[in-house]
Amino acid sequence: TCIATGEKIKYLTALLNSKLCRYQLFETAPRTGMGDLIISVQALEPLLVHYPTASEEQPIEALLDRILAAKAADPAADVRALEAEIDRHVYQLYGLTDDEIAVIEETTGA
C-alpha cells in the first residue's frame, strides 16, 4: 500500500488520475511477464509531476472538490465532464499540442 502525504495532496490526486498521468504510467510502468502493469512506488517515481503555482493549483482543486461532493451525494454520479475539465487543465500545465493531446485521448479512451 502506498500512502501520499504532504502538501498539494488534492492537486496530486487530480493529476495522478488525469489522462496524461495514466498515459505516462502505461508507457513507463514495469510489466509482469504476462504484460500486466505493476503499479508501485517505483512506477510512480519517474512520473513527470508539474509543481503548480497557486493559480494553477486552485482550479484543479476546485474541480476535484466538485467531483468529491457529487460522489458523496450520489456514488453513481456522472463526473466525466468535470474529469475532462481537469484533463484540459493538465494539458495546459504541460503545454501539450493538439496532436499530443489527440494521442493521449486516443490511447486512454476519450
Image (cartoon, rainbow, N blue to C red):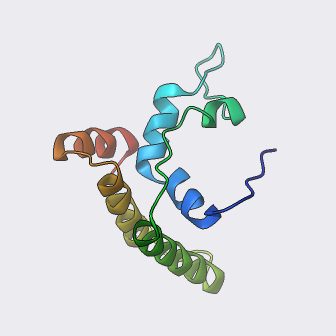
Left or right: residue 98 compared with residue 4:
left
Percent of width and height locating residue 76: 57, 74
- Above or below 38: residue 79: below
x, y percent for residue 57: 47, 67
Q: Which residue does the image show at 65% across and 13% down from the upper left?
A: 33
Q: What residue lies at 59% left-to-right and 76% top-to-bottom?
A: 68
Up-down relation of residue 93 to residue 41 (above or below)? below
Question: 90 or 104, which lies in front?
Answer: 90
Q: As rendered, which of 36 and 47 lies closer to the eye?
A: 47
Quadrant location of the N terminus?
Answer: top right
What is the x, y in percent for residue 86? Answer: 40, 64
Please say if 103 is above or below 29: below
Q: 15 or 75: which is nearer to us? A: 15
Q: Residue furthest bottom?
A: 73
Res 70 quadrant in image = bottom right
Q: Quadrant of residue 41?
A: top right
